[in-house]
Amino acid sequence: MSRATLHKQPREVAAMFDGVARRYDLTNTVLSFGQDRYWRRATKAALRPAPGERVLDLAAGTAVSTVELAAAGASAVGCDFSLGMLRAGRGRGVPLVAGDALRLPFADASFDAVTISFGLRNVADVDTALAELARVTRPGGRLVVCEFSRPTWAPLRTVYLGYLMRALPAVARRVSSNPDAYVYLAESIRAWPGQAELAARIGAAGWRQVGWRDLTGGIVALHRATRP
């Protein structure tokens, strides 16, 4: 199936990402006008990975973000449920594990810090995924969620939504190895909750000291929290 539905059946979503893996990183850079690099750096800065720490990069895709975290000296592990994405990320020099965000293949309190970038909105059960991330994080450990969000300035929000639903699929047709998938991705971004609602759900999943910072006018938000 080339395009998943917003009901987020795991097999459909995994197959969709398998289909975009070949040109995924290039497509992201083109569609974000190069902002994807800035968002990765901001995520790393918010997570503060330190030498010797064990860090989980969930929904790691082709492991570009995992490499960014490992560059700080941390022991970073990438995890994704798309085998196509993991195959595309082989050879980057970081460990990669196939796994479902709803049943992570790691023991309790395995990591000092965990992060998920642009993947939380694609899981079938967001609250279960957030609870699983809490389970595998040690007490006092850190969470950073980098995800598309709601622009806070109304004119920007209007322009952005227009880009999502019209221009993004058109650009994807020229660049992506599976352009139909980007229609789903655009729809999933539009349906995603705003910053305050996501913060409340993170807190309800057992995290504490939840806060967020807007990037690029709120097109993306970084949510930070601590495991009690």
Image: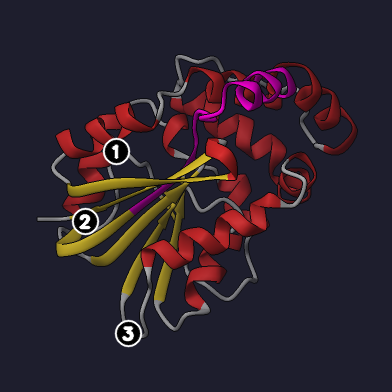
Sequence-wise first label, 3 or 2: 3
Q: Residue furthest right?
A: 174
Determine the CA span between mark 1 and mark 2. Answer: 11 Å
SS at badge 3: loop
Screen quadrant of the C terminus: bottom left
Viewer-proximal residue among 103 and 222 = 222
176 vs 36: above or below: above
Find the magenta span and give its range. 144-163
Is residue 211 inside the magenta stretch?
Answer: no
Viewer-proximal residue among 8 and 32 = 32
Which residue appears at 52% of the width and 37% of the height?
Answer: 218
The dot on residue 129 is: 1
Location of residue 131 by image quarter: top left
46 vs 24: above or below: below
Which residue appears at 59% of the width and 18% of the height?
Answer: 187
Horizontally, is 199 left or right of 153 in the view?
left
Instruction: Check disc 3 and report the residue beneath it.
Output: 52
Screen quadrant of the N terminus: top right
